[in-house]
Image: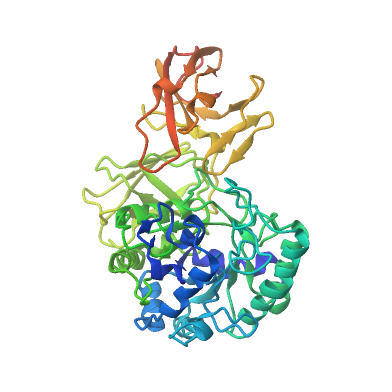
Amino acid sequence: MDAKERLQWWTQARFGMFIHWGLYAVLAGEFNGQKTPHIGEWIMRDLRIPILEYEKLAGQFNPVGFDAEVWAQLAQDAGMKYLVITAKHHDGFCMFDSPSNPYNIVKQTPFKRDPMKELAAACNKRGIRMCFYYSQDLDWHAPGGGGHWEEAKPGDSSLAYQRPPEDFQKYLDTVVKPNLRELLTHYGPIGLIWFDVPVTISKAQSEALRDLVHELQPACLVSGRVGNDVGDYGSLGDNEHPVGKLPGAWETPATLNDTWGFKKDDHHWKSVDSLIDLLVNCASKGVNYLLNVGPTAEGIIPQPSVELLRQVGQWLRRNGEAIYGTQASPLMTDPPWGRVTSKGNTLYLLVKQWSERGIALHGLQNKVLAAHLLGAAQASVGIEQEADVVNFLLPAAAPEKTVSVVAVTLDGPPRAEQLIFQYGDSAVHFPTALAQVRGNMKQHHARGVEGWTDPAMGVSWKFRARAAGVYEVRAITRVNRKNPELFGNHEVNISVDDRSVSGVVGVRDMMPPADNKTFQMVSSVAAIPQPRSLQGGDCLVF
């Protein structure tokens, strides 16, 4: 079975539940009166808790409130099609009954039950794919595991610290591979193994784990975080959302608040509007959305998580047609009013900014045959199409508070011109993640480019202007707040057709930083005169 076959159910699913649950939930973000400033599940490493001290948490872990039926039902209520739970995180504690590793929930805790077996049964009953997270590289408990800090040099906080390579290979052979065999033979069909943090593992070792998974369950997917680009699909960074559509299969893991594992003081819950917005954005880029909950040590999913997920599920029951089984937008960039997905001969316009004047779609090369609103069958949508611009005339009231959906029937599979378009006289945005790059720079799916160290390097875009005039050019770069002198005060030259403007993007222009963020934006503004050929409808290189 090849990756394309394995991915069929996964690309249909689009939305999954992530669960981070382990001994760290007992601490809930605090140890001996000291609170961790970081995420909950990393408390052992961040607060340098000795192995013998951390092991004592197992005696306190008794999640009598755990009910697999309740957890699986919440995933179903939220519209999630697969569930990924931490079978073993970096602390090395197995949350399943492992014959090969006595450091597990059945043998070491008063609970004495295998929650993975109960959850697998509950998910199977509801048609939800059961999946396991497994930390294959970092293991702060087992000898030979990556990331141990006890033997590192003072001040060395590198994640890549490990014992000799032969010790790490022994760890893979005696801990990881036996665990994988257990997870893939004792719990029925498994949708995927979600590996994580491949900082020390070699390509050959990543390939060996991938091949073992496929040998044991040929239909089981292997996440991209197995390392060295050998997984069945790619994984974006934590809470990282793409700017444009991505080639191949991708997923973004995200949190409901700031942490993954439970922290009692983390009440920074995202709004339901932002969650739907992120789900819609991922789907429009052809990316799966894996949204996390962090249960308590008692086995209870926090009530704010429950309420938020149920509200997302309510929206999906009315509009899921525009998410499940869809492909990325055929457009190069997002229209200013929202996002676009596609399925067969249908485009779904996911409208975030409703307007009684209607919305426009630029660059579509198909003929539009019909359009209607999801969840509002009685409301009519008018169509005005001229060349590559389609205007959709909307009812006065939006059917949804957050994102409403217009389903558009085309004369065939969607085709669109791959340009950046200006809508009306609005600003035109040029994300570097979608630029043509000149020179040896690294281009990220969400963060743009880095490594711009030579004036010969550059980025360019093709765009079509709709309104002639004098334009203000604003260049925005990202700097590290800890070392701003290393990243700011660069001169930038911007050309449009035969006109150009230069300016310094400097630390003096720093925007107010977001809380707890290492990076912040630097903005510089200049005016560029109207080039002679910048008339409405012209295509230019920027």
Quadrant the N terminus occupies: bottom right
Residue drawn at x 54%, y 17% is 495
Q: Nearer the viewer, residue 227 or 223?
A: 227
Image x and y of residue 229, in percent:
69, 55
Residue drawn at x 56%, y 84% is 97
Quadrant the C terminus occupies: top right
Image x and y of residue 264, in percent:
32, 63
Rendered view: 255 above or below 419: below
Say whether residue 205 is left or right of residue 184.
Answer: right
Q: Nearer the viewer, residue 174 or 310?
A: 174
Say whether residue 299 is left or right of residue 435.
Answer: left
Q: Residue furthest bottom?
A: 112
Rendered view: 316 above or below 116: above
Q: Disc count in the image?
A: 0
The answer to whether residue 57 shows anywhere in this view is yes
Q: Nearer the viewer, residue 63 or 387?
A: 63
Rendered view: 466 above or below 272: above
Image x and y of residue 232, in percent:
66, 62
Q: Nearer the viewer, residue 208 or 245?
A: 208
**Colouring used for the render:** rainbow
Image x and y of residue 306, in percent:
31, 69
**Residue 263's quadrant in the figure?**
bottom left
**Residue 259's quadrant in the figure?**
bottom left
The answer to whether residue 84 shows anywhere in this view is no
Residue drawn at x 63%, y 85% is 99
Rendered view: 307 above or below 507: below
